[in-house]
Image: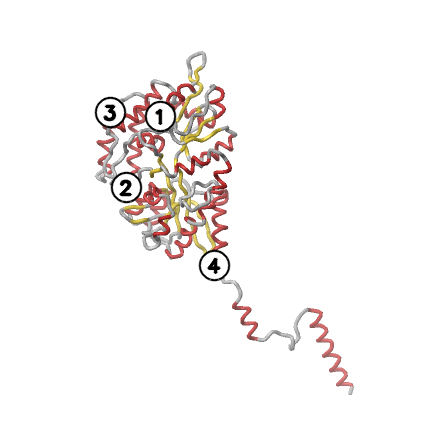
Amino acid sequence: MKKSIIFILITAFLLAACAQSGEATPSEAAPAEESTNMEEAAPAEKTVVQVLSWWDYTTSTPLQELKAGFEAENPDLELEFIQVGEGYADKVLTMIAGGGEMPDVMMLAMDKVPFFADRGAIQNLDSYISDDYKNELYPFVLDALTYDGSVYAVARDVTPKVMFLNTDLFTAAGLDIPSADWTWDDFKALASQLTVKDDGGQTTQWGFYFPKYADGFAHWIMQNDATLVSADGMTSTLDSANAIEAINFLRDMILVDGSIPTESQAQQFGTSGNAPFLANKVAMVAGGLSTTVSLDDAGINYTVLPLPKGKLDLNTAFVNAWTIPTGAKDPDLSWRVMEYFSTNGQQIVLDTGMGLPASNSVDTSEFVAAHDFNRYFIEAMDTAVPFPAPLYGADYWTLIKTEFDLMWLGDISVEDAVSSVVEQGNLILSGEN
């Protein structure tokens, strides 16, 4: 009898202890089958997808927003951004040539796409690009990302050119902002009126500035119904009468009108392409949407117009891109990232100021409503043509800058500078040099 009572007490004690500790008694435990189902429902480990860029992810709001947006739509994947700094293109080519493990996605500028594609450093995307996808792109975008008839990249963002005008300097000169259909003649006259000299005859303010590399003046040549290179990218075309006329137009504004500073004059305010404008020493400068970031940060009062019209109504646009490097472990996985970046992610591109969207399906109404002049960024997409990107463009642009530096200073004539560029440039562009 005592043993039975002791057993009952021990059993009651153990049941009470289980209840206090929160542990289930044998009769309350989940069935083995339910336990197995709970294990199967546990989230699987995410696959890490590496994205290479020249931007620092920790300070880039656009990249952070793209990561968040992509991972929300793709919960099985996690993006990891890797930065490669100065000398990006050369370093990446070395990585690919080394045959080691490559990231899954790679940022690349459009002018590098032909060279990387020709060298087999990036993968052909024709099997991924659908007709519906192509139809949503602004026409110039597809041209910029195509090499030898095949698509090798998708757009990160696009940058057509517009003109920025310093409204304070216009007001100080007693000048009205011109209409959106202004011409080269209107522009040149305004640049002269906005140029100011001190009592000693030294210029203290200029009407316009452009950096003296090809992207700084290519749109002037192309607006004058000329080109810098042939359609196949194999021949220099700078010796055409229209190209020479456009170059002389700008050179005269430097050497005759004095309304454009020389590089030594401009660089006393900084080395960036917008430095004189940011210093309130230049009234007009051409640029893209990203220019607004530095102007807003500097507190510059400005407005925006389309570029003044020449023989043709056009502007040059630059396209930054995403590509799949040769050696990427799973191209299908890479494409999932790139497809998002270049479709749904294009709204993030616009909303974060990364650039303008490459797709005409992106809602730009809020962007346009934010400032009256924002419509000109969107309208510029309709008249944009891609900045020329010949196979050996890097060496060709370097040659132009070297020869033209003397020409802008008046040390040699436009004709002599162009002749030298054409002679040497044809060897470079054809691959002979």
In the picture of the structure, the residue carrying the numbered disc 4 is 76
Of all residues shown, which one is farthest toward the bottom? 1
Q: CA distance from mark 3 to mark 2?
A: 25 Å
Q: Amino acid at mark 3?
A: Asp
Q: Is residue 261 above or below residue 378?
A: above
Q: Quadrant of the N terminus?
A: bottom right
Q: Amino acid at mark 2?
A: Leu
In the picture of the structure, the residue carrying the numbered disc 1 is 184
Q: Secondary structure at mark 1?
A: helix
Sequence order check: which comes first, mark 3 or mark 2?
2
Q: CA distance from mark 3 to mark 1?
A: 25 Å
Sequence order check: which comes first, mark 4 or mark 2?
4
- In the figure, is residue 234 to the left or right of 31? left
In the picture of the structure, the residue carrying the numbered disc 3 is 416
In the picture of the structure, the residue carrying the numbered disc 2 is 391
Q: Amino acid at mark 1?
A: Trp
Image location of residue 208, percent across then percent down: 40, 24
Image location of residue 283, percent across then percent down: 44, 24
